[in-house]
Image (spheres, rainbow, N blue to C red):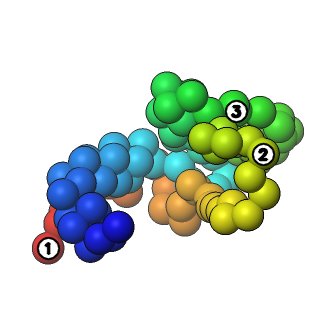
Amino acid sequence: MDFRSYFRSRQAEMLSLLKELVLRESPTSDKKAVDACAAGLVERFARLGSKVVRIPQKSAGDFHLVEYPAKDDRRQEGRILVLTHIDTVWPVGKIQTMPFYVQ
């Protein structure tokens, strides 16, 4: 597979998702904002057929375990783990003075 062409052909879609996430401001200390940002991603994963398990947190954004089924569940090799976070250091409202842009 030509990954360069694959991702280049989806660049607009990826930038659109990135902008959506940036505009959902999610400062670490604001559980409600982080959970709202996560909800958008969880919804996308669910639409793709992923199994999503929510692990509630009291003072921080909830954790989510997202499993995307392989075409052949018996296959044990070639699995990928993606570990990420969605919170930011910027307070809600910072987007007004530091807007999203692509350069």
Say which element carries label 1.
loop
- 41 or 34: which is nearer to us? 41
Nearer the camera: disc 3 or disc 2: 2
Q: Position of residue 94 (x, y in %)?
A: 37, 57
- 50 or 71: which is nearer to us? 71
Say which element carries label 2.
loop
- Residue sitting at x 54%, y 61%: 88
Q: Is residue 30 above or below residue 86?
A: above
- Residue sitting at x 21%, y 67%: 5
Q: Disc number at residue 103?
A: 1
Residues under numbered marks 3 and 2 in contact, where contact means CB atoms less than 8 Å apart: no
> What's the CA distance linking mark 3 and mark 2?
20 Å
- Residue sitting at x 56%, y 55%: 86
Q: Earlier in the sequence, mark 2 or mark 1?
A: 2
Q: Is residue 103 above or below residue 57?
A: below
Q: Earlier in the sequence, mark 3 or mark 2?
A: 3
Give left or right: position of 49 versus 59.
left
Q: Position of residue 78 (x, y in %)?
A: 67, 65
Nearer the camera: disc 3 or disc 1: 3
Label 2 Cα crowd, 10 Å radius (few <14 / some 14-19 / many 20+): few
The amino acid beneath tag 3 is: Val
Quadrant of the drawing holding the N terminus: bottom left
The amino acid beneath tag 2 is: Arg
- Residue sitting at x 67%, y 42%: 72
Residue 87 picture quarter: bottom right
